[in-house]
Image (cartoon, helix red, strand yellow):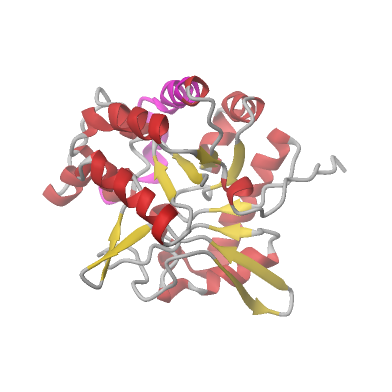
Amino acid sequence: MTNALTIDVEDYYHVSAFESIIKYKDWGRFESRVEKNTMKILELLNTFKIKATFFILGWIAERSPQMVKEIQKEGHEIACHGYRHQLVYEIGPEKFREDITRSKRILEDIIGKEVIGYRAPSYSITKKSLWALDILIEEGFKYDSSIFPIRHDRYGIPDFSRFSKKISLNEKGEILEIPLSTIQLFGKNIPIAGGGYLRLLPVRFIEWGIRSLNKKEAQPAIIYFHPWEIDPKQPKLNGSRVSVFRHYVNIGKTFSKLKRLLNNIKFGPIREVFSVGFTAPVSSQ
């Protein structure tokens, strides 16, 4: 079974864990490392002949259009990660719409194709912000991969479906929700979706979880990581103990763990794994 491999393209200073100490207006002052790390990811995927979905922050795409073109040239799917990496449940419907339409337009102008997928920063579509799905439908998105069916202090809808489901929220259409992957142990949803969980948990456990989803539940896994997670030499940022731990724990092991997963597990982009359709050309008018 082919599983979905996704990369959330943001830099180390964009993460929500440090938003209280790094303001949006100061982003331009930090050393950018996202292009170098993303190129390294492209080389890695090329080695294993794997295609993936790249959820790209609009702020980055605006400043690195050639990188976006290179990702597309390599045959990967381009999707939207918003523009400013703001938590959906904090900015409200009006600002959310402005954020996603701005980012979608930037990406489509660069690649000349429709962008149909979205992922919220820090999986911030929760019960407080389910209104976001209405807006995504209205703005032409075909799928969303923002809901994490777990308990977490920042995100999560623990009683949401563990597997993809179509949601019709108004008369204007529907959207396919593709939750991040979990397995059930002792009656609880245990995350195996990658990112910090890949860094924190043994790679054998993640691999076992993916195979369990494929074989026992006949479901593909959805795995994610960030370019900064393969960069142990990134500048060290200060923050709370929890934030520092979450960001840096086992960061030096991510690349080797990814190599093992890519060698042992079959992956592809969301648009192919879930058959949500290929992007259509965008008019230049």
Q: Is residue 112 magenta?
A: no
Q: Is residue 27 magenta?
A: yes
Residue at 49% across, 69% down? 92
Q: Which residues are magenta?
A: 18-44
Farthest residue in the left direction?
241
* Residue 158: x %, y % from top left: 33, 72
Residue at 27% across, 48% down? 197
* Residue 168: x %, y % from top left: 64, 76
Decide which of 191, 111 is in the foreground and name it: 191
The quarter holding residue 202 reads: top left
Q: Is residue 99 above or below residue 61?
A: below
> Does residue 54 appear to the left or right of 87 in the view shown?
right
Residue 30 appears in the rendering: no
The quarter holding residue 215 reads: bottom left
> Does residue 59 appear to the left or right of 251 in the view shown?
right
* Residue 244: x %, y % from top left: 17, 43
Q: Is residue 117 above or below residue 96?
A: above
* Residue 276: x %, y % from top left: 67, 55
Residue 10 appears in the rendering: yes
Residue at 45% across, 26% down? 41
